[in-house]
Amino acid sequence: MKLKIVRKKQKGIAERKTENRQKKALPYKALTLGMLLWLFITWLFFGSGIVRHIDLAEGQRVPSTIVASVDFESEDLTETALNQTKAGNAISPVFTIDPAPSQRATKVVEKLFDRLLQLTTTSTNQQQIIENSIEDLLLGSSVSALEMIHLFPSNQIIAAKTVLTTNLVRVMEAGILSDEYRRTLFRDAPDRKVTLQENNETSSKTVTQKDIYSIQQALLSITDQIDDDRQRELSKQLLSTFVEDNMTYDEATTEALRHKAIGAVKPVMHQYLSGTTLVHAGDSATQQTLLLLQQHEQKRQQEQDVFEQVLEIIGNGILLLAGLIASSIILRVVAPKILQRPDQLLLLVVLSLFTLGLARLLIYLSAQYSVISPSLLMYLVPHALAILLAGILLGGSAAICLGLWTSFATAVLFDQSFNVFALGILITVTATSTARNVHRRSSLFKAGLWVCAVKVLFVLVAGILNRPVISVLIGQLFAAILAGMISTALALFLIPVFEKLFKITTDITLLELSDMGNPLLQKMAIQAPGTYHHSLMVATLAQNAAEAIGANSLLTRVCAYYHDIGKMAKPEFFTENIQHKENPHDELSPHMSALIIVSHVKEGLTLARRNKLPQPILDAIEQHHGNGLISFFYHKAKIQQQKDLSNENINDSDFRYGGAPAVSPEMTILSLADAAEAAARSIEKPTPQKISNMVNDIFSTKIRDGQLNYSNLTMAEINIVKESLIFSLSNMLHGRIPYPKDHENNPTQSTKKPSSLST
């Protein structure tokens, strides 16, 4: 009873796996995703109106004459700058007067005249001490104490002191300006205004330069009330040591006042009528040109009525739809399987949003906040990010179609710019070709360098045609390199994220799994050494065959390593592990033996999922036998039936694997290589003819049994795979020349041990 239940279950699995797979007439999920993408991108680009991108940089040659289509007003930058310069120059330099020099000079003068007065009233023996103190005060001056005593008699000391100290304070409080400031700040212009501001005070006054004292003028003003000529000259010599300039230029305050005055200047506006030529073809773009075009575009948008805006948005939306349809048609031709995979289509949608969303963000930042110069925008768009990710995750065909769509959509966003479209296509071709065989993460950086090189070359060619100023050209080069590097770094970071989210296995992951030090492979080498060696042989055969028809040889090789891991559950029941032991199947019924053999597929799937192996390896485990017939035990059961003269029908579904037929070239090659390698072990004294006959029989059996119905291989490719397997097996199992024993060559040495011969 139990055996019948098992047979019924196996029959159900086999019949379910052999059902014809009918494709839908219309990929409704793909159409839905496409429509949602189109609607979202149209809203993202034009939801707030059409934003025209001015693809000009300062100094660049204008490609065509531009005429105003509406009346608008714009600032005259030249006249505004002239008025701002006048306003800035009208602000007088601000100086602060330092009171310390005045205080020091006044203190010294008062002490000198106090000592002179004290000298007239002191005793004779004290006079020398006072004279010495006067000399100390006069240190550094050309005046001596004796001259002071001789020229200022006692009856004139108090009057001279009063005159000098009073005038000294008056003059120095008015301010003394150095000759250096007169030359550098005023260029000896006597009518220039000066704002005087005392330290720690908010009060200030404005005077002309001619009203400010110089050192010589200050000395004359201080001493001009002294009538005696000799006293006047002596006072000048005395004060020249202590009187100094005390006005300091306050640059910070002066610049703040000038900026305030410049900011208060109103822009000079001019009216431009519709039909006015704003710029001629071939002219060099200036700041005034760029401002005119920007103001004209803003006014045009303001005056545009709702109906015109809607028509413009519809027109751009139709362009986007046309580009999306064209890309989808190309995708259907070059990679039709993707249209049947909603998860992969969703990945393409997400990747396109990366590029298009960032492009819209860059334009928003440039238009609203002037964060980015318009001349840099097209080079900052990260075209390469989506292309690199698509090329690695989905293959070159998908990357080309994605690049065509994003390049076209970005060109529409940039006001139907051909340069943007051309740059996007060049980056698409470069990124797709360089990321086609990325097996290591370091190879991705090489792809990024190629993308940067192409963008730099495009910038230089555009520079030759448009001739922008050097600063703009350098900025564009920097933007191109920066965008390429950031795209590469983000791609490297996002690859494992998208692998997990969309269950995609890249060549990078496969290369990591091909490490023979993997714990699962090491475990198989110990528990099932025959199976391990069989897997290595199959990997070599399958890899060579995959390379012969241009299939993914790395995927085929890695899947071959793991396709038989389920045999580790019962390794002793499989021929390659039996070796010289007794065959356990001799004691089992054919049905039970078939159940054990079939179980290695289920055990392998369980073990693979437990070790989190990627989906391609799960497919390899399930599909490498398909739902093929276990012919040995099937025929053994028939023989036993004939011997036992039993009327029980032998159902071949009881002896079929429960897997699914191979649905890709790689899995088909693995299935054929697995069968060919296993059969080759049974050939005695293999010759090329025997191997060829054996492989031909295997292929014929697989074709008759329907195991190649979904392989997506042409008969020409199947024949190439066949020839590759025959060639590889013939070289692996080549015959060897029998070496004569030593005693046959030299009878006298027949008693010696035979020497080892290298083959």
Image (cartoon, rainbow, N blue to C red):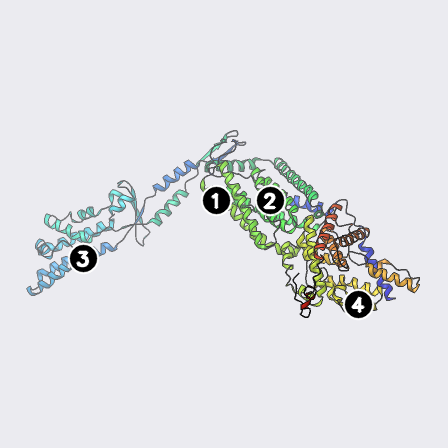
Q: Is residue 285 left or right of residue 512?
A: left
Q: Earlier in the sequence, mark 4 or mark 2?
A: 2
In the image, what residue type sits under mark 4? Asn
Q: CA distance from mark 4 to mark 2?
A: 59 Å
Q: Position of residue 566 (x, y in %)?
A: 74, 63
Please state which of residues 747 and 576 is positioned toward the viewer in this rendering: 747
For marks 1 and 4, give the one nearer the viewer: 4
Specify the label residue 475 is tagged with. 1
Q: Give the secondary structure at mark 4.
A: loop
For the residue carrying disc 2, how many other residues have a C-alpha within 10 Å: few (<14), some (14-19), or many (20+)? many
- Residue position marked by numbered label 4 in the rendering: 583
Whether 577 is drawn above or below 541: the answer is below
Q: Earlier in the sequence, mark 2 or mark 1?
A: 2
Q: Is residue 255 left or right of residue 459?
A: left
Specify the label residue 108 is tagged with. 3
Q: CA distance from mark 1 to mark 4?
A: 77 Å
Q: Are marks 3 and 2 in contact (CB under 8 Å)?
A: no
Q: Position of residue 483 (x, y in %)?
A: 54, 48
In the rendered image, the residue lying farthest to the left is: 124
Residue at image x 77%, y 59%? 684
For marks 4 and 3, give the one nearer the viewer: 4
Specify the label residue 428 is tagged with. 2
For the residue carrying disc 1, how many other residues have a C-alpha within 10 Å: few (<14), some (14-19), or many (20+)? some
Q: Quadrant of residue 518?
A: bottom right
